[in-house]
Amino acid sequence: MLRILALLAALSGLMACTNSNDLDETPAYLGDFSLGHNVVVAPNLTKGPASREASKEEWIAAMTTAIDERFGRYEGERLYHLGISVEGYVLAVTGIPLVASPKSALILKVTVWDDAMQKKLNEEPHQVTVMESVSGSTILGSGLTQTKEKQLENLSRNAAKLIQAWMEQQNHEQGWFESGAAEGETDGAAGAGDAPAPDEAAAAAPAG
């Protein structure tokens, strides 16, 4: 994990950025999706080299807020729960402009739980790799221009946007969020009142 984070931090300036500043726009189509439990854990959190320190609690709070902001806008007819494990991060420290300006990065894993079916939609956790967005304030590295709190917020928002894009793709290809599309659904399927408790959803979240 440390080697991966170090590589990500070194290459992030060459990779496409993610624009998460679209929360005031109409949400991307996700069928009948409505957010149920939003469970974020960080049992194996690893800090990469040349990084500011951020606690598990800080990452959990930032990611929980970002998921609520992006997915709380959906008002579909069925509940789906998100289990997210924050795995590793780099929060860029101050570098030398144009010579050594480290970038921030984040790795997490996500699992989607269908409440009515009482099952995970992806048996294997989906890994998401996140980079800081490139803007006028980060072109020389966010360590020079942003507080740790702002870095946490930006990476978490970018992560939520990438999760949304992945869920859009899964819905397009496999019909994840289309009512009645899942095979095996019956009239006796569990309803909203049978949603897994937060600790059960946490157990479904990838642990590493």
Image (cartoon, rainbow, N blue to C red):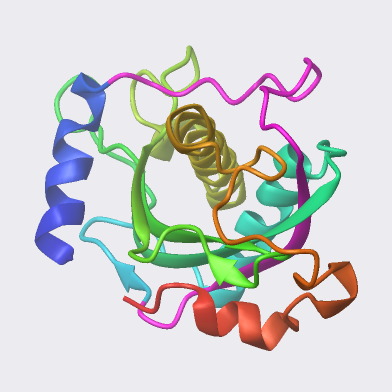
- Residue 115 position by quadrant: bottom right
Say above or below: 135 vs 207.
above
Question: x and y percent of residue 54 in the render?
Answer: 48, 67
* Left or right: where 202 falls relative to 50: right
Image point 35% across, 80% down: which residue? Answer: 44
Image point 50% across, 43% down: which residue? Answer: 159
Question: x and y percent of residue 85 in the render?
Answer: 46, 68
Task: Report the front residue among 39 and 184.
Answer: 184
Question: x and y percent of residue 184 in the render?
Answer: 58, 61
Q: Is residue 93 visible?
A: no
- Answer whether residue 30 is magenta in the image: yes
Image point 66% across, 37% down: which residue? Answer: 178
Quadrant of the rendering where the N terminus is positioned: bottom left
- Residue 5 position by quadrant: bottom left
Question: x and y percent of residue 158 in the render?
Answer: 52, 36
Q: Give the dominant element type of the magenta stretch: helix, strand or loop.
A: loop
Say above or below: 36 vs 146.
below
- Answer whether residue 72 is magenta in the image: no
* Left or right: where 201 falls relative to 143: right
Say above or below: 116 vs 128.
below
Task: Report the front residue among 161 and 90.
Answer: 161
- Residue 143 position by quadrant: top left
Q: Which residues are magenta?
A: 16-44
Task: Report the front residue among 31 and 20.
Answer: 31
